[in-house]
Image: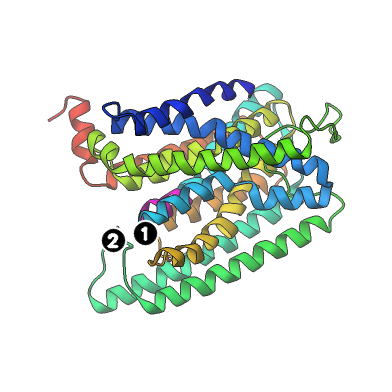
Amino acid sequence: MKWLRYLIIFVPVAFALEFIPGLKNDLALFVICCLGLIPLAGFLGEATEELSVHTGPKVGGLLNATLGNAAELIISIVALSQGKIELVKASITGSILGNLLLILGFALLLGGVRHGIQRFDRQAAGVAASMMTLAVIGLIIPTLFEVLRAIDLGAFHVFSTEVHDNALDALSMGVAAVLIVLYVLSLVFTFSQPKHGVGGHSGVDDNTTESGKAHHAPKWNVPTAIGVLLISTLGIVFLSEFLVGTVEPFAKALGLSEFFIGIIIIPLVGNVAEHIVAVQMAFKNKMDLAITIAMGSSMQVALLVGPLLVFISLLFGTQMTLFFSVIEVAALTLSVLLATIVSMDGESNWLEGSQLLAVYVITALGFFYITSGVHETAMRLLGIG
């Protein structure tokens, strides 16, 4: 994973494109920012891991559980500050789908091809699956509430979630508070167990030896780790600002929607380093760690990042709600159901990985074609019509 660090060269390139007169190109800047955010997110996660080594397993586990998706949270906060609420909600959905289907699918596929039948802790995976189910319920209730309310008023729009409803605002804050409390309770449960279950690892680095025991040889001292953490955070803030500012022109140039970019592209940018490690762990036949990374990250997004953004949005004058489009809620529900079915027996194989990947591709195609203007663009690229 060290090769990702070479992508850091794109950070100064992004600054040059943004600030040097005559150089700015929205399409190029969007791509450069995506590439530059990947190593910054990796360094942020690595600094968190290093601090965890110094602080001990309990405090370290808490750091990982709260900062595991810090890069994605920062990108979302910047987007909220620019009024891109729909983009933020799409990235929440995309992050959960990406972890449960794309990353877990690749992990099971590649691990299964190399090792055949792989086994993991069924209890830990079951806890994560039940928590994800509860999180999806937390999204279904506000969505169902607003859909039924809109139908009753004769103002229902299938794909639009931009509504002004005081009751929905209050409901979203209540549900968000419950989900955060549930996440805290999951941490209490996890840290009270002899072994940390799903959710206790951020997945940025492999801190285990071949025997499976964690080693505690820090590469950085505490000041260095804190310095890297702060610098990475600052870099992510700036590049997120550049990135969000170019989403609209990038989308228009390619005939895409901001929704599709938010649900497919942006979630991958903030989590590439973590995703690669999950696949590497499966390839090394460390399935417990691979499952922990993929499902634990989904839990953080659904139970912590998303609900926190509901309250953070209040700082910018427009509240984000937990009202998602019907197709998003359907995709999340079916994905959690499939991930639960795959993990309930404590065994995995390459075919189950292929199934998860197939569902991700089908879902991505669905999101691609439901957005306005995309169908015509695809037909034109294929030379049809």
Percent position of residue 340, x then y? 61, 51
**Kind of residue sitting beneath label 2:** Val
Q: Nearer the viewer, residue 11 or 274?
A: 11
Q: Position of residue 222 (x, y in %)?
A: 77, 40
Question: Which numbered dot is residue 325?
Answer: 1
The label shown at residue 280 is none
> Magenta span has 87?
yes
- The quarter of the picture where the C terminus appears is top left
Above or below residue 18? Residue 321 is: below
Distance from disc 1 to disc 2, alpha carbons, whole Å, reads 7 Å
Q: Secondary structure at mark 2?
A: loop
Query: What segment carries the magenta color?
Result: 86-92
Can residue 359 be seen? Answer: no
- Residue 124 in percent (x, y) is at 74, 50
- At 66% across and 61% down in the image, what residue appears? 183
Identified by mark 1, the residue type is: Ser
Rendering coords of residue 255 (x, y %): 23, 37
Tell which of 229 and 116 is nearer to you. Answer: 229
Q: Looking at the image, which is closer to me, 221 or 343?
A: 221
Q: Is residue 144 magenta?
A: no
114 or 243: which is nearer to us? 243
